[in-house]
Amino acid sequence: MQGKTLEQLIEEALETVDEIFPWDLEELIAEQKELLLLDVREACGFDTMKIKGSMNVPRGILETACEYNFDATVPELVEARSRPIITICRSGKRSVLAAQTMQWMGYENVVSLKLGVKGWNDSDLPLYDKNGKQVDGDEAAEFLEPPIKPEQMQP
């Protein structure tokens, strides 16, 4: 039996998950103080560059971060079930799947950032490193667009 591709999983998730473009998120951040920006990338990517004010919960521990009584529990996230949440990843794919998972867990207002941090940077919006210093947009583009190695290509 052949399984589903990543693209098929994302297509299905988009039946219930809404997306927001980076330029629209910029406006939303200015308007909604209760907005929670949830970056689901691994810590190394998040520490290298992030959208200011975002929280990092890698997708691999998302479910346990969203509930009490786990070593990965993030109380602010557990208590945010009715807050507006934007899920963020590098390209906007994993964030769709994270948003869907959160919907399944009872989160009422979760939206995915279309195009991810890459799209944010491509829109000339600022990214910051773990020390709060703004990252150069060209350097960010290089980091966010790693080349695919020959062995990673479909034969």
Image (spheres, rainbow, N blue to C red):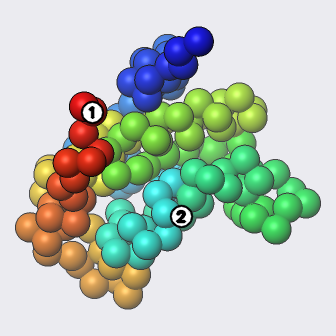
Say which mark, if any, is on residue 154.
1
Q: Dot 2, crowdedness within 10 Å: few (<14), some or many (≥20)? A: many
Quadrant of residue 75 in the image? bottom right
Disc 2 from disc 1: Cα separation = 32 Å
Locate residue 136 relative to residue 4 in the image: left or right: left
Residue at the spot 18% in from the left edge and 55% down from the top edge: 147
Task: Please state which of residues 80 and 130 is positioned toward the viewer in this rendering.
Answer: 130
Q: Which secondary structure, mark 2?
A: strand
Residue 21, percent from left and from top: 28, 37
Residue at the spot 43% in from the left edge and 28% down from the top edge: 6
Q: Which of marks 2 and 1 is nearer the N terminus?
A: 2
Q: Which secondary structure, mark 1?
A: loop
Which residue is the site of mark 2?
56
Say which mark, if any, is on residue 102.
none
Q: Is residue 121 visible?
A: no
Residue at the spot 78% in from the left edge and 62% down from the top edge: 73
Dot in front, 2 or 1: 1
What kind of residue is marked 2? Asn
Check the image and report above or below for 41 versus 80: below
Q: Residue furthest left?
A: 138
Task: Please state which of residues 153 and 111 is positioned toward the viewer in this rendering.
Answer: 153
Q: Dot 1, crowdedness within 10 Å: few (<14), some or many (≥20)? A: few
